[in-house]
Amino acid sequence: MDSLITASARALAAGDPLGALKRVALRNDGPALALRGIAMAQLGDFPRAKELLRRAARAFTVKGAVAHARCVVAEAEVALASRDLNWPANALDAARATLEQHGDRLNAAFARYLAVRRLLLIGHLEEVERTLADLDPAPFPPALRTAHELVIAGIAMRRLRTNEARAALTRAEQAAHRARIPALTAEVESAFRILNTPAARRVARGEERLLLLEEVESLLSSKALVIDACRNVVRKADTIVSLTTRPVLFALARALGEAWPGDVPRDVLLARAFGARFVDESHRARLRVEIGRLRRVLRPLTAITATQRGFALKPRTREVVVLARPVEEEHGAVLAFLADGESWSSSALALALGASQRTVQRTLDELAAAGKVQFFGQARARRWITPPVPGFTTILLLPAPLLGD
């Protein structure tokens, strides 16, 4: 490797993409194309980065299998950064196998971490944990140690293990400081902010207050009956009843929880659950049917009794709490992903949410019409972005099981 390539690589390792480009901007050989692609990725021009890395991969012959594999790994990193979650994972697996076969354990480990971070984004926490169990981060350089700890922190935050998350982020901060890469330091700082900003609202006995993620964890592990409007479940400690596919029942449960220890009039329940403005006997009959269904599903947690005005919860606990989003927002799950500040395609959002691409596209169009999201690019190259909600974290809206799920 010649001196210009070496100097460019060192500049990239130090987080200086412009310095790297100055040395190889006019060269079109394989190593130079690869370095130019990585530099463009660091500068945020992901389409150009992908193009350069693909050209670099083609420039290496069969004798350059390791270099070709490294280009594939770099392209996968760009795909992850640009939230192209449909990028072929089997290509990354093949590149990792090639690197392991040729003894390049460092880049093979990096490839594995890219796969792990993709799984974390789409909420496959069990697969992430199985993969991490096979990785020993001790021999890794500081940059990879940072990535390892960030993944551990991400799992812990999604599972609401805040002490574990804080410890992992502290280790990540130390590793990032040793790596001296500003982008890594910024990523760790961003993760720390999730722990130190409000994650939900606590609604109980007519009063509301904001909760940090740590306080949410304490609430969910307490003896209180929690009606969780972030995940549409009703829970008490480890007993959980999911109402994610039964919005009418959850609307009734939430209305009863917000009114506890009082009752809720029938007309209020009809308005909350069915949006009924004018009440007739058919509405009352439907309410009785739905209350009966809610009684059955919540029987392990609470009773529901009829009162003169309507209905009330009679829980087997001294406290009932509604856990609500910090800011009530329709299509909150989509906005939760976009709040990371990265640009997402509709196909990537559909994959992460487990929804159809057409459903996600309609949601994005509604949000764009309301001025809540913006897009750039056309057709398949279109990407969607939005600034995060100031002062709030959306970690509870991401698709992952909570403690005890």
Image (cartoon, rainbow, N blue to C red):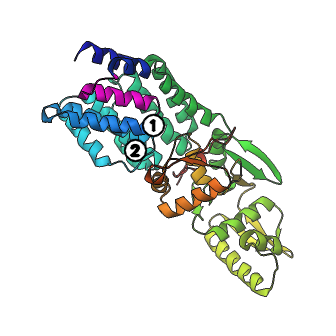
Dot placed on the residue nearer the N-terminal end, 2 or 1: 2
Tag 1 secondary structure: helix
Residue 153 drawn at (x, y percent): 50, 36
The kind of residue on which mark 1 rests is Val
**Viewer-nearest residue: 73 or 190:** 73
Asked if residue 280 is positioned above or below residue 401 in the image, the reply reads below
Asked if residue 315 is positioned above or below residue 217 in the image, the reply reads below
290 displayed left or right of 51: right
**Viewer-nearest residue: 401 or 394:** 394
Q: In the image as oriented, which residue stretches furthest toward the top?
A: 3
The kind of residue on which mark 2 rests is Val
Whether residue 135 can be seen here:
no
Q: Which residue is mark 2?
A: 128
Instruction: Give, as a single range, the part of the protein colored magenta.
Output: 25-44
Q: Quadrant of residue 369?
A: bottom right
162 displayed left or right of 204: left
Residue 177 drawn at (x, y percent): 48, 18
Instruction: Give the alpha-carbon distance from disc 2 to disc 1, as whole Å.
Output: 9 Å
Whether residue 245 can be seen here:
yes
Tag 2 secondary structure: helix
